[in-house]
Amino acid sequence: MAFPLTVDSEWRSRYSAAVGRISRQLATIRPGQPVRLAKKPATCLGSLPDPDARSGRQSIQSCFEVDPINRVAEVGGMTTYEDLVAATLPYGLMPMCVPQLRTITLGGAVTGLGIESASFRNGTPHESVVAMDILTGTGEVLTVTNKSDDPHRDLFYAFPNSYGSLGYALKLTIELEPTKPFVHVQHVRYASASALTQSMQEIVASGEFQGSRVDFLDGTVFSASEQYLTIGTMVGELPAGRATSDYTGMAIYYRSIQTLTNDYLTIGDYLWRWDTDWFWCSRAFGAQLPAVRTLWPKSKLRSDVYWKFIAANRKFKFAEKLAAIQRKPQRESVVQDIEIPVERLPEFLDFSTRK
């Protein structure tokens, strides 16, 4: 096997040309006109990009190069984690932090932050970034690193969580970590938030659970007395007679948390375990009803498909019209990511589950 692996052997010239096209288009945008970089099929920069600009957008939507020896990858800013993981897993590698939904982009996760079950070990996506090419508001493209002699070092540290206010990440160099083919998953139930929090703190401090290494850690709360830590450990092989579970079809992952103490998934299926049902939100579209799920194409059991339904509802207001016909009050759907200091977690969970 030749190293390093080049996913696109001509990526450097294509990327350079793409950066030039994007920079030129940015220069044509009038003051006050909205500017955005977006994934397909949305626009690239401005509101009506020409075909040349669309080509530029597509050229920063791929994993350019994976270096298995040094465990780094050079990645377009609009590359989805789905494509990035597909490029790295064949080499036994994955990003340090892989957000739960397939179509989150690397640039988006860095500029808007992201978190996942490996974050207690590896932090959030920006903490494994080595270098970035950032398109600034002036049309200039700056390569930034954390090196002490880098004149743009401040931009490297200010960029995470800036939500596009400082520029767009066109290319990122990120660190990778080794994987194993399977993940042993344990769902451990706790009767209270305080018990769950104490166990979580012990696992984070030691990196172990009952004497075994912990690679992944997350939690799910069903009620005040039914709370779970899901503990994942990468393993090289399955126990004799044991098969992996598949949550991309009829089985629903979050329900398995309540019914299985031990489970096994391939590393790829573990990374996307929440995506098939967008956590539990797919039930709003009937996708968890057995009769509907049987007919639903398995390739369309994905979070980005559900997002399209939401976009259509926002545009045509189907739910609001139905509620008006049924004389029901309007409802507002809220999905909110928040950060809670661990010492305040029991208080927050007790409040959240209070009837």
Image (tube, rainbow, N blue to C red):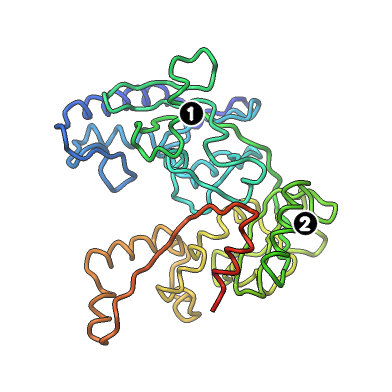
Residue at position x 22%, y 24% from top? Answer: 24
In the rendered structure, which amino acid carries the disc numbered 1? Answer: Tyr
Q: Nearer the viewer, residue 302 or 111?
A: 111
For residue 16, side relative to residue 293 (left or right): left
Q: Secondary structure at mark 2?
A: loop
Q: Horizontal and vertical percent for residue 8?
A: 46, 30
Residue at position x 71%, y 71% from top? Answer: 260
Q: Which residue is mark 1?
A: 157
- Specify few, some or many for label 2: CA neighbours under 10 Å numbering under 14, 14-19, or 20 or more: some
Q: CA distance from mark 1 to mark 2?
A: 42 Å
Q: Please give the label number shown on residue 238.
A: 2
For residue 169, side relative to residue 253 (left or right): left
Residue at position x 25%, y 86% from top? Answer: 327
- Specify few, some or many for label 1: CA neighbours under 10 Å numbering under 14, 14-19, or 20 or more: some
Q: Are marks 1 and 2 in contact (CB under 8 Å)?
A: no
For residue 130, side relative to residue 8 (left or right): right
Seen in the picture, residue 35 relative to 320 is either above or below; the reply is: above
Q: Nearer the viewer, residue 101 or 334?
A: 334
Which image quadrant: the N terminus? Answer: top right
Seen in the picture, residue 53 relative to 3 is either above or below; the reply is: below
Q: In the displayed image of the protein, which residue is found farthest to the top?
A: 149
Residue at position x 33%, y 35% from top? Answer: 165
Q: In the displayed image of the protein, which residue is found farthest to the right?
A: 211
Q: Horizontal and vertical percent for residue 15?
A: 37, 26
Quadrant hosting residue 311: bottom left
Q: Nearer the viewer, residue 328 or 142?
A: 328
For residue 19, side relative to residue 175 (left or right): left
Q: Nearer the viewer, residue 178 or 27?
A: 27
The numbered mark, 1 or 2, whose residue comes first in the sequence reads 1
Q: Horizontal and vertical percent for residue 63?
A: 47, 35
Q: Please give the label number shown on residue 18.
A: none
